[in-house]
Amino acid sequence: MINFKKMIPLFSANDQKLQCFLLVLLSMFTIKIGVIPAWNSVNSDFPNYYISARLLTEGADFKNVYDDDWFNAKIRENGIEQQGKFSPFPPATAFVMLPLTPFSTLTAKRIWTVVNIVLLGANVWLLQKITGWQLVA
């Protein structure tokens, strides 16, 4: 088993300013490239999961979900301009977004973004606990 606490640290104690600078720089990059676009628009695979979950709550006939034309029509009906495609997702993936279906599309995307940020923070915290690494002393 690897003992992370005995490994050579990435930075020496004298490099705290560099650590802080890199952490702030990486955080700003993540916010600019990831968080802000996610907050302002519905893109990527989000419509595929969200619309399929919404169709489940509406009792829609799920046999058409793999028909791209039908699925894209449902996406447009919900005010999303981006093309979607449910395949090759298995039907069970529609359950992921069920708790978000009472919300509008953009609100659901914002909630999903916040949940992902919280989970990212939890992962950083867990990695710190596992490895004994200190972000900044």
Image (cartoon, rainbow, N blue to C red):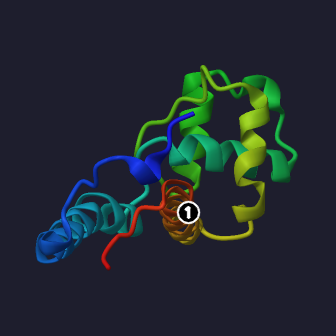
Give residue 5's position: percent from left, percent from top: 45, 54
- Visible residue check, residue 81: no
- 129 left or right, relative to 52: left
Can residue 14 be seen here?
yes
Q: Residue at x 55, y 72 (%)?
A: 107
Quarter that holds the C terminus: bottom left
102 over 67 or under it: above or below: below
Horizontal and vertical percent for residue 20? 20, 75
Check disc 1 and give the amino acid type: Lys
Considering depth in this image, is 48 or 20 the residue closer to the camera?
Answer: 20
At x 31% / y 62%, what residue is drawn? 37
Q: Is residue 94 above or below residue 30?
A: above
Q: Mark 1 points at which residue?
A: 129
Image coordinates for residue 45, horizontal then vertical, percent: 49, 41
Q: In which quarter of the image is the N terminus?
A: top right
The residue at 55%/26% (across/down) is: 69
Give the answer, above or below, for where 69 lies relative to 47. Answer: above
Number of marks in picture: 1
Q: How far from the left and from the top, in percent, is residue 78?
A: 58, 55
- Assess disc 1: are there few (<14), some (14-19) or many (≥20) residues with their C-alpha within 10 Å of its C-alpha: few
Picture residue at 60% right of the left edge, 29% below the top: 86
Quadrant position of residue 92: top right
Camera-side residue of 80 and 26: 26
- Mark 1 lies on a secondary structure that is helix
